[in-house]
Amino acid sequence: MTALDRRDFLIALTAMTLVVLSSNILVQYPFQHLGLGDYLTWGAFSYPFAFLVTDLSNRRFGTQGARRVVYVGFLLAVGLSFILATPRIAIASGAAFLAAQLLDIGIFSSLRGKAWWVPPFMSSVISSALDTAIFFSVAFYCGAVPGLGLTIDQILAAVGIADQCIALPWVNLAVADYLVKLALAALAIAPYGAILTIMRPRLQRTA
């Protein structure tokens, strides 16, 4: 890896960590404007940019390099979230992040030969659905887990993690969050294209 590669990798890693960490903090605060407190959190506006970072990393470094950004960003963001957010938020975020970002990389790579805007848009649309479903059900569902008869708090307590469920309308939040992600996925096409043009001389085009 050249010095330029290392610099770009560090930029991608820093951006990924900041996006995920800030989102894990902001998701605890409902968006109280326009009567949307039961439908949106502030985290809905920041987290979709994680997919932009992943897709640009995929273009810059290829599939393997993008996975490295995701893995290292996952460790840093989840570790910091245990300190600055809550254990339950950190676990929910980590599970959702890892599953969705790896899915995003796979979809993006399979569409690499399409028009430049298709891979980032389609991969974000599909993987965001998985991310939203995992995160909100784990983070804010306070009832018993079907088939287990235990709440997530009880499961965490059994492994020595003390936390308490934050009672938020998680289904409403999940639906609204996904709609915001769809809107931002469309809006992110413009900055993605602009950054892609700047990066073009050093793109990694192989999977």
Image: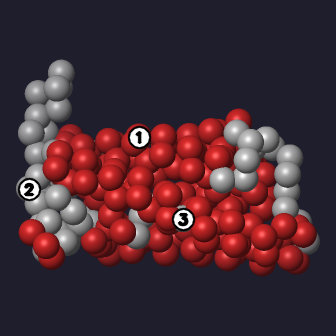
Q: Quadrant of residue 176?
A: bottom left
Is 123 on the left-hand or right-hand side of 78?
right
Front label number (3 vs 1) = 3
Residue with the mark numbered 1:
130
Amino acid type indicated by mark 3? Ala
**Dot 2 surroundings within 10 Å: few (below 14), some, or many (20 or more)?**
few
- Label at residue 188: 3
Q: Nearer the viewer, residue 114 or 51?
A: 114
Q: Which residue is depicted at the point 44% across and 62% down?
A: 184
* Image location (x, y in percent) of residue 19: 47, 71
* Label located before the other in sequence (2 or 3): 2
Q: Which residue is depicted at the point 57% across and 50% down?
A: 121
Task: Reply above or below: 53 against 70.
Answer: below
Amino acid type indicated by mark 1? Leu
* Image location (x, y in percent) of residue 175: 25, 48
Is 172 on the left-hand or right-hand side of 197?
left
Q: Is residue 43 visible?
A: yes
**Dot 3 surroundings within 10 Å: few (below 14), some, or many (20 or more)?**
some
SS type, badge 3: loop
Give the distance between the C-alpha atoms of the residues marked 3 and 1, in whole angstroms: 19 Å
* Label located before the other in sequence (3 or 1): 1
Residue with the mark numbered 2:
167
